[in-house]
Amino acid sequence: MQTETDLPDLDPEDTSPAVLRALELLRRGKRFLLVGHVRPDGDCLGSQAALASVLRSLGKEVFIVNPDPPEPRYGYLAAEVDFRAWQGGTLPVHDVAVLLDFNDLARTGKMAPELARAPSKKLVVDHHVLPTEAWWDEAYVDVHASATGLLVLRIARALGAELDQAAARGVFTSLVTDTGWFKYSNADAETLTAAGEMVRLGVRPHEVYSALYQRRSHVHPTAIGKLLSRTRYFADRRLALVTQPIEEAREEGLVDSDEVLDILRSVATVEVVLYLRELAEGGVKLSARSKSDYDVHALSRAFGGGGHKKAAGATLPGGLAEAEEKVVAAALAGFDARA
């Protein structure tokens, strides 16, 4: 097993030992299991769709199994790719498990023990900050990449694979969902060039946008208004907090966290937004975003989570009031440390 120090930041032409080992594992493997995190998002599902297509074009056998099924809005991907939701029992027979868009086995929820027991090689393909101790066999990681789907595109090039329509839509979905449709600071030249390539391959951006953002329930606007009505500000309106209790989370029209976070980030004075959502299975989900040099990854790590400097999250035990008290206090301490 390798250590974190073996994993340099990658560029599209990187031929470091860690990258070469990861690519060799992909070349050598015959049966692949692609695994995503709980509540898989666009980057996770898009990466899986793209990598599944790439590997199958090379004659590999591929299965996709996630802890949860995809949201209905990703139906255009699911129509071409078989996303299975794990229901317990044994996993498909495989010799390589590729874990996409996460690097903590606990992020697979109830699948974690079964994955840990599997004798397969474990390959992480991710753009999040890595934990201190490596539990995987190989890793293809670039914390500066805008999306995991961008890494899959690099892999396809390195393996000499052509992208079909399903793969192109997968990569494009990864890019647009993790860059906020190219409005976040991670939408760099490589990302925009890759998006253009996917369009040349036949992706129709307006169709993807419509599927992702224009097929909401009629109660969706009301749900957003209800949620935003509980917004509170701290630290001279530099910190915004919105909370969602479990009774509202169960209602039809549950809103996507990124949408709410984007609205609150539009406030001129706001640097950091915290979204605390009570979970049906217990605990509270924290989503944190920054539009300054405030490091929300460090904030989330304090609660057992992680992510990126400007976008991170965690799951806290206990109730909403307890989580709110702890997270707000820690966030305010972060502002004080920067003063």
Image (spheres, grey):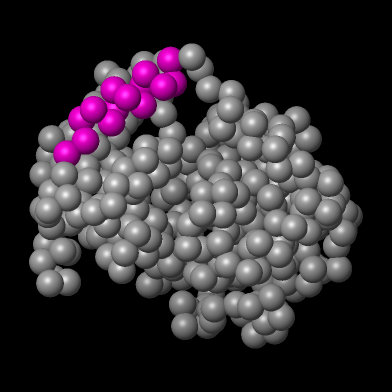
Residue 270 screen position, x and y as percent: 25, 52
Range drawn in magenta:
219-232
Q: State which quarter of the image contains the C terminus.
A: bottom left
Name the residue: 31% across, 64% down: 292
> Magenta: predominant secondary structure element?
helix
Name the residue: 53% across, 75% down: 1
Query: In terms of image quadrants, where is residue 224?
Result: top left
Q: Nearer the viewer, residue 43 or 116?
A: 43
Q: Nearer the viewer, residue 75 or 258?
A: 258
Residue 200 screen position, x and y as percent: 83, 54
Name the residue: 58% across, 44% down: 42
Q: Residue furthest front?
A: 268
From the viewer's perspective, tell me whether residue 62 is left or right of residue 130.
right
Residue 163 lies in the magenta-colored region? no
Residue 165 screen position, x and y as percent: 83, 45
Tag count in the figure? 0
Residue 291 screen position, x and y as percent: 35, 59
From the viewer's perspective, tell me whether residue 236 is left or right of residue 152.
left
Residue 148 visible in the snapshot: yes
Name the residue: 15% across, 64% down: 335
Query: In terms of image quadrants, where is residue 84?
Result: top right
Residue 111 visible in the snapshot: no
From the viewer's perspective, tell me whether residue 91 is left or right of residue 261.
right
Q: Nearer the viewer, residue 41 or 111?
A: 41
